[in-house]
Amino acid sequence: MIKKPITIQIPSGLEARPVALLVQVASQYESEIYVESEAKRVNAKSIMGMMTLGLNAGENITVTANGGDEKEAMDDIEKYLSGKE
């Protein structure tokens, strides 16, 4: 299991389109992937769950990945949230 703090650097934050793209990135992997913000923890493969977080640019979250491809999943999610994709 990998657990990593990440700062959202997508200028618009995680509104509808960026959330949909994040869910697409997460769904490519078999690993269980969760995003935590304050007291909420949601499945990164759930578009409805991710929308409930209402995350903005500059906010800090913790991403957890657990499974056979957790390293690749974490790398891709971090790259996406860092605005480097």
Image: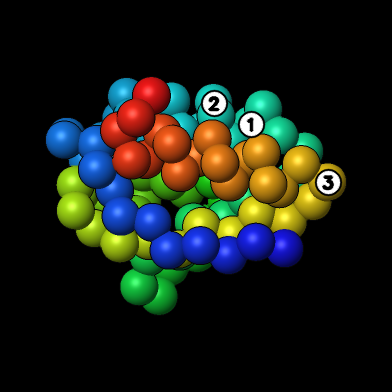
Quarter of the image with the C terminus in it: top left
Q: Position of residue 61 (x, y in %)?
A: 37, 61
Query: In the image, what residue occupies the spot 34% across and 30% down?
Result: 84
Say if mark 1 contacts mark 2, CB within 8 Å: yes
Q: Position of residue 50 (x, y in %)?
A: 43, 46
Amino acid type, mark 2 = Gln
Mark 3 to mark 2 CA distance (whole Å):
18 Å
Q: Secondary structure at mark 3?
A: loop
Instruction: Please give the label number shown on residue 24.
Output: 2
User: Marks 3 and 1: which is nearer the front?
Assistant: 3
Asked if residue 45 can be seen in this view, the reply is: no
Q: Position of residue 75 (x, y in %)?
A: 56, 41
Q: Is residue 13 above or below residue 84?
A: below
Q: Which of the marked residues, 3 or 1, is nearer the chain's N terminus? A: 1
Amino acid type, mark 3 = Gly
Viewer-nearest residue: 78 or 64: 78
Q: Is residue 69 left or right of residue 23?
A: right
Mark 3 to mark 1 CA distance (whole Å):
14 Å
Say if mark 3 contacts mark 2, CB within 8 Å: no
Q: Secondary structure at mark 1?
A: helix
Mark 1 to mark 2 CA distance (whole Å):
5 Å
Mark 1 — residue? 27
Q: Is residue 50 above or below residue 29?
A: below
Mark 3 — residue? 68
Amino acid type, mark 1 = Ser
Name the quadrant containing residue 10: top left
User: Marks 3 and 2: which is nearer the front?
Assistant: 3
Q: Which of the marked residues, 3 or 2, is nearer the chain's N terminus? A: 2
Query: In the image, what residue occupies the spot 40% across and 75% down?
Result: 39
Q: Secondary structure at mark 2?
A: helix
Query: In the image, what residue occupies the spot 19% across and 53% down?
Result: 58
